[in-house]
Image (cartoon, grey):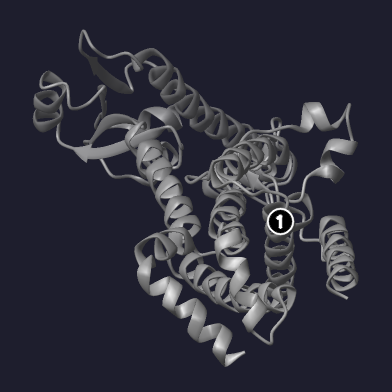
């Protein structure tokens, strides 16, 4: 095995930039796409200025509700500064929570609680205004409910009185427990669901992206199989004690160790940069997926004699796998009608966390038949 490593190391030294690029390509590409998406998502939020003329609990609750809205990026500012930024078109709109807001809400008044400003380029002013109105109406409704409860308590049970704060908290608890609209987002390969209303919703499943890019990188790294089968190189094995098939399989083992080591680097990288979880079971699933890619790439490379054809099929196959796997675009509507597509895709077991991959068994059977056939031919 040491001689195999030394021989392969000589090849790697001559083409180390290419080898290093394809080894790290899945990690770098997946990280860049996820990071770029997060940046675009953050930049696409609507910039809204909010000026607080009073900082009562009701006013602060309104500000917090606006900050928790995933489509808005709230800037706390003064009225003068906010209008200046609006004039420069750095803000889409400005809302002034006026002095006496809490007092008017508690008294049931809904007139002129908030002053708003817009410019001729305020494309999202109307929906933001309606959202602001809904939050204010929510506060006034809680206040009205608190007054009603207080009147009923005074009339029927004077000994048990509820404060407005207690009624408001109870109202929030009921709203949280009895959502009128409940929406969840789910992604391929993820068991957990992110509820609508959070600040951060990740569009991409980073391990799904990594899995797709790993298909391409593994296929292109295994072009050495075709290079080693050239007639000009095969003739040397007549003077070597090691059979050609044993030479290829030992190189496959060497690539397995190398690529799985890079996979562990990917696990650590995604854990540190993207807060992805690590577990022994996931690493086991990752090892099975990696071995599936390696055996599949080896089998495919054995079927070709020309690099150009192999590269063309590699890119086409990666594209088909990416589309049908659901890692890039949702395919639930298709797989509901054609369930066999889900089982035919080699990425599906990895994305679903399964430790059984039928493609791995198929590849091993083909390699075994190839091994036996070569033995008979050489004999």
Residue hosting label 1: 302
Specify whether 157 is left or right of 66: right
* Residue 347 x %, y %: 72, 51
- Quadrant containing the C terminus in the rendered view: bottom right
Dot 1 alpha-carbon crowd within 10 angstroms: few under 14, some 14 to 19, many 20 or more: some
- Quadrant containing the N terminus in the rendered view: bottom right
Q: Secondary structure at mark 1?
A: helix
- Residue shown at the point (44%, 72%) measured from the top left: 11
Specify whether 273 is left or right of 176: left
Along the line of sight, which residue is nearer the eye, 365 or 309?
309
* Residue 245 x %, y %: 74, 73
- Residue shown at the point (38%, 33%) measured from the top left: 72
Q: Looking at the rendering, which quadrant does residue 64 occupy?
A: top left
- Residue shown at the point (47%, 45%) measured from the top left: 199
Query: How many marks are shown on the rendered structure?
Result: 1
Q: Looking at the rendering, which quadrant does residue 322 occupy?
A: top right
Q: Is residue 120 above or below residue 109?
A: above
Along the line of sight, which residue is nearer the eye, 244 or 13?
244
Along the line of sight, which residue is nearer the eye, 22 or 68?
22
Q: Is residue 145 visible?
A: yes
* Residue 173 x %, y %: 65, 47
Of all residues, the one furthest to the top in this rendering is 120
Q: Looking at the rendering, which quadrant does residue 37 occupy?
A: top left
Q: Is residue 229 above or below residue 131?
A: below
Q: Is residue 94 above or below residue 213?
A: above
Specify whether 118 is left or right of 8: left
Q: Is residue 110 visible?
A: no
Q: Is residue 365 above or below residue 201?
A: below
* Residue 358 x %, y %: 87, 57
Specify whether 131 is left or right of 363: left
Along the line of sight, which residue is nearer the eye, 266 or 220?
220
């Amino acid at each position: 095995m040491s001689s195999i490593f030394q021989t392969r190391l000589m090849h790697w030294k001559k083409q180390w930039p290419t080898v290093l690029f394809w080894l790290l390509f899945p990690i770098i590409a997946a990280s860049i796409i996820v990071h770029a998406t997060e940046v675009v998502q953050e930049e696409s939020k609507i910039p809204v200025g909010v000026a607080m003329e009073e900082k009562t609990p009701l006013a602060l609750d309104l500000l917090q509700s606006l900050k928790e809205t995933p489509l808005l990026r709230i800037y706390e500012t003064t009225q003068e500064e906010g209008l200046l930024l609006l004039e420069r078109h750095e803000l889409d709109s400005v809302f002034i929570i006026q002095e006496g807001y809490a007092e008017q809400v508690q008294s049931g008044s809904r007139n002129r609680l908030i002053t708003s400003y817009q410019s001729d380029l305020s494309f999202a002013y109307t929906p933001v205004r309606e959202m602001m109105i809904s939050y204010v109406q929510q506060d006034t409704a809680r206040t009205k409910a608190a007054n009603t409860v207080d009147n009923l308590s005074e009339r029927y049970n004077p000994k048990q009185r509820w404060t407005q704060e207690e009624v408001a908290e109870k109202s929030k608890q009921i709203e949280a427990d009895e959502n009128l609209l409940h929406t969840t987002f789910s992604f391929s390969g993820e068991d957990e669901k992110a509820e609508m209303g959070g600040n951060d919703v990740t569009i991409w499943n980073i391990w799904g992206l990594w899995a797709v890019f790993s298909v391409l990188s593994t296929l292109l790294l295994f072009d050495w199989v075709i290079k080693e089968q050239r007639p000009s190189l095969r003739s040397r094995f007549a003077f070597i004690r090691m059979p050609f098939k044993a030479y290829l399989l030992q190189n496959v083992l060497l690539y397995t160790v190398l690529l799985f080591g890079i996979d562990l680097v990917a696990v650590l990288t995604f854990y540190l940069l993207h807060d992805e979880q690590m577990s022994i079971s996931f690493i086991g699933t990752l090892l099975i997926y990696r071995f599936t890619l390696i055996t599949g790439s080896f089998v495919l490379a054995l079927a070709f004699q020309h690099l150009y054809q192999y590269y063309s099929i590699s890119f086409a196959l990666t594209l088909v796998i990416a589309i049908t796997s659901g890692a890039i675009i949702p395919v639930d509507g298709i797989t509901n009608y054609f369930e066999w597509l889900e089982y035919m895709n080699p990425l599906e077991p990895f994305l679903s966390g399964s430790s059984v991959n039928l493609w791995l068994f198929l590849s091993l059977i083909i390699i075994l038949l190839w091994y036996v056939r070569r033995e008979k031919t050489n004999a």
